[in-house]
Image: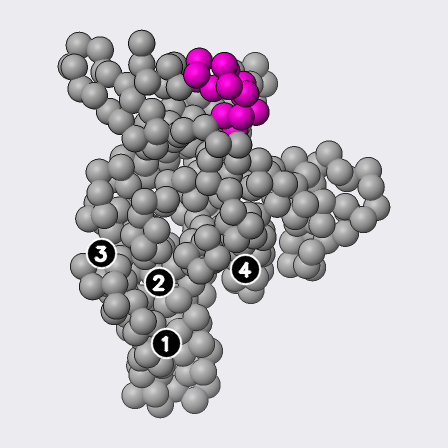
Amino acid sequence: MTAAVGAWIGNEASGGAIGWLLGGSRSWTITVPGAGWVLTGRAVFLAATAVTILLLAGIGVALSRKAELRRRWTTWAVIIPAVGIPIWVGRGTTALLAAALGLQAVRELSRLTGLPRVETTILAVLAAAYPLAAWLRPGLMALAPLMVLVCAVPAVLAGDIEHGLRRATVAGFSSIWIPWSLAHLVVLWHDAFLIAFAAAAADVAAWAGGTFLRPMAWARRPLSPLSPNKTLGGLVGAVVGAALILTLLGHITPGLVIAVGLGGVLGDLLESLVKRTAGVKDAGAWLPGFGGLLDRVDSLLLVLPLAAVLG
C-alpha cells in the first residue's frame, strides 16, 4: 500500500477529508511499476493532482465535441510536463525553463511594440541573465533598477528625439515585466509549480465567476475599459478560486491568495494594455487555442514577484 493511501485512511479515521484539507500531508510516495523507482515528496502530490484534473477536463472536452476546447486541452497536456518536469529536476533546469519562456515572450513583445533590434537584444540577454543570476548569484537580482536605466542607453546614444523616450520606457518596463519576473520561477523554485498551477486554476475561476455571477449588476461591472470581459465578478471568482486551490494544495496564506487571485487578474489587464496599444487580439499564434506565449504567462508575470514578496 502506498504512503498516499495510508495517509488518506489515517486522515479518514481522525477527521476525514475536511481534516486532510486543513492539515493533511501533501507529501506522497509512489513506486513506478516495473522500473522499481520510488518517487516521494510534495511534487508527487502536485503531479497527481495536475494529471487528475487534466484527465477529468479531458472527459468534459470530449463530450463537448468543440474543436477549440480540444486544442486548448491538447496545449495544456503539453504545458504541464513541459513546465513541471524542469521544475521537478532542480533549480538549474528551472532557470533554463525561465530563460526559454523569457526569450519567446521578449520576441512576441518586440513584435507587438515595434522595439528596435538593440533594445530587443538587451531584453533577450536579460531574459537569459536574470534566471541564471537567480540560480547562481541571487544578489544580482537587485540590479534590476540599474538595468532599467541601461535600457535607455541605445536611444540616448542614437539621439532619437522623436521616439527615444518611448523606446526607453517600453524597454525599461519590459525588462522588469518579463525577464525579471520570470526569474522568480527560480527564486520560488520549491513552490514554483504550485504557484503556476494555482495561477492557472485562478484564471479558470475568474472565467467561472464572471460567467455565473453575471446576473448580478455589480458583478458585470468592468474592471477596466481595456477589457470589458474582465469584470468584478471575475475578480471575485479569481480570489475565491485562489483560496480554494491553495487550500487543496495545502499552501494557503493570505499573501498567496492576494498574489494569485489579484495578481493574475491584473496581469491579464496589463497585457491587454500592451495588446490594445498594438491593436492586436493575441500576442502571437505559438500556442494553439491560446495565442502567443505572452497570452499564457501574462498572469504569472505579476503573480510570481507578488508571491515572492507576500507569500
Q: Is residue 31 depicted above or below 110 in this figure?
A: above
Of the two numbered discs 1 and 3 on the same chain, state the one appearing first in sequence.
Answer: 3
**Please, what is the three-letter code of the amino acid marked with disc 2?**
Trp
Residue denoted by label 2: 180
Q: Position of residue 305 (x, y in %)?
A: 43, 58
Residue 36 shown left or right of residue 261 in the figure:
left
Q: Position of residue 121 (x, y in %)?
A: 27, 67
CA separation, marks 2 and 1? 10 Å
Residue denoted by label 3: 135
**Please, what is the three-letter code of the amino acid marked with disc 1?**
Pro
**Please, what is the three-letter code of the amino acid marked with disc 3?**
Trp
Mark 4 or 2, which is nearer the eye?
2
Residue 299 is a magenta residue: no
Q: Position of residue 13 (x, y in %)?
A: 50, 14
Residue 17 is a magenta residue: yes
CA separation, marks 4 and 2? 16 Å
Residue denoted by label 1: 145
SS type, badge 1: helix
SS type, badge 2: helix
Rendering colour mode: one colour
Of the two numbered discs 4 and 1 on the same chain, state the one appearing first in sequence.
Answer: 1
Mark 1 or 3, which is nearer the eye?
3
Characterize the local packing of mark 3: few (<14), some (14-19) or many (20 or more) Cα atoms within 10 angstroms: many
Q: Pointers 4 and 2 in contact (CB under 8 A)?
A: no
Q: Is residue 128 visible?
A: no
Q: Pointers 4 and 1 in contact (CB under 8 A)?
A: no
Q: Residue furthest left?
A: 35
Residue 117 shown left or right of residue 23 in the figure:
left
Q: Which residues are magenta?
A: 8-21
**Please, what is the three-letter code of the amino acid marked with disc 4?**
Leu
